[in-house]
Image: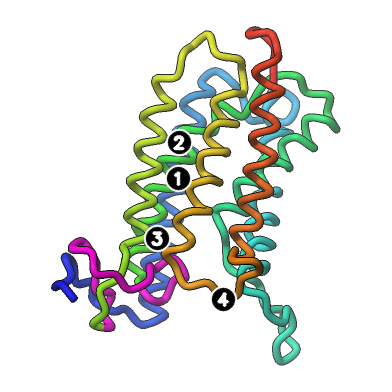
């Protein structure tokens, strides 16, 4: 086995939690700043902004979806020693939950304006920052990779050369962000977000094969099955959006 390209000091669970939380908060702040910058001139107040219901739906859906998807990936009892066990978080569940939350909010409040495209860049660049925390947390996070003989393997403190799965995702997300930033301005509204969602679902189906999986069914983990459903949803929405007039809201 080749010598790992990187050696990351192994953190204890408390240190890993602090590091991961710090980068997670930085990712939220960056994403929020980028989104707010893209909506310059729009108020976030309920009585003045058409975006407010969608934003609330996005946040509630993201939290619920991220927890549910993480539990499906690694199911366990929700009550332990009389205490509620709150599952971790999943980017896949967060994305799909946020999408569903926005769509429900738009239907409830009769919103017609497209909101999805404005979340693409904030989400992808925020993901890049968040995955740095996942990488530094090492074996304390479920995002680490399986052992590999490839020359760019990393040692996360256990002496084993592993796929740097979080770094793969940073590279993918940054590339996708740059590609979608140059998206034609005359494309149907909402198409950029749907392509982003489809690309991310497809990516996660593939990269999950490089990570430990708590369980699988027919060769796919729980998270991969969620991604397959999300990919089918996104692909259907892409077809529908492509059929809309180019000026129509999504």
Residue 163 lies in the magenta-colored region:
no
Give the image location of residue 74, x and y in percent: 61, 73
Write down the quadrant of residue 248 in the picture. top right
Task: Name which residue lies at 65% across and 46% down.
Answer: 230
Q: Residue furthest left?
A: 3
Which label belongs to residue 33? Answer: 2
Q: Which residue is mark 4?
A: 214
First in sequence, mark 1 or 4: give its number: 1
User: Is 61 displayed left or right of 3 in the figure?
Assistant: right
Residue 225, x across and y down, in percent: 65, 57
Q: State the mark number for residue 29.
A: 1
* Numbered tag placed on residue 55 in the rendering: none
Which stretch appears magenta?
Answer: 139-158
**How many discs mark residues in the rendered view?**
4
Label 3: few (<14), some or many (≥20) within 10 Å? few
Q: Quadrant of residue 63?
A: bottom right
Residue identified by numbered label 3: 22
Q: Nearer the viewer, residue 133 or 212?
A: 212
Q: CA distance from mark 3 to mark 2?
A: 16 Å
The answer to whether residue 56 of the structure is visible from this angle is no
Marks 3/2 in contact by CB < 8 Å: the verdict is: no
Q: Are marks 2 and 1 in contact (CB under 8 Å)?
A: yes
In this rendering, the answer to whether 37 lies above or below 189 is below
Q: Is residue 142 above or below residue 157?
A: above
Which secondary structure lies at badge 2? helix
């Amino acid at each position: 086995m080749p010598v790992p390209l990187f050696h990351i000091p192994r953190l204890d669970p408390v240190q890993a939690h602090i590091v991961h939380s710090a980068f997670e908060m930085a990712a939220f702040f960056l994403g929020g700043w980028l989104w707010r910058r893209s909506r310059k001139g729009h108020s976030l107040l309920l009585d003045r902004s058409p975006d407010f219901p969608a934003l609330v739906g996005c946040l509630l859906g993201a939290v619920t979806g991220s927890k549910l998807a993480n539990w499906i990936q690694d199911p366990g009892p929700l009550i332990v020693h009389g205490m509620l066990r709150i599952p971790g978080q999943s980017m896949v569940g967060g994305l799909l939950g946020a999408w569903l939350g926005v769509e429900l909010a738009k239907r409830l409040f009769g919103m017609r304006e497209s909101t999805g495209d404005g979340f693409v860049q904030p989400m992808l660049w925020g993901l890049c920052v968040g995955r740095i925390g996942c990488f530094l947390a090492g074996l304390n996070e479920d995002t680490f990779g399986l052992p590999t003989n490839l020359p760019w393997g990393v040692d996360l403190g256990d002496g084993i050369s592993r796929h740097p799965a979080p770094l793969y995702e940073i590279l993918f997300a940054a590339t996708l962000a740059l590609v979608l930033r140059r998206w034609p301005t005359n494309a149907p509204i909402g198409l950029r977000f749907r392509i982003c969602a489809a690309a991310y679902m497809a990516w996660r189906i593939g990269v999950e094969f490089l990570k430990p999986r708590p369980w699988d069914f027919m060769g796919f983990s729980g998270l991969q099955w969620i991604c397959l459903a999300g990919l089918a949803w996104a692909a259907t929405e892409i077809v529908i959006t492509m059929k809309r007039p180019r000026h129509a809201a999504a």
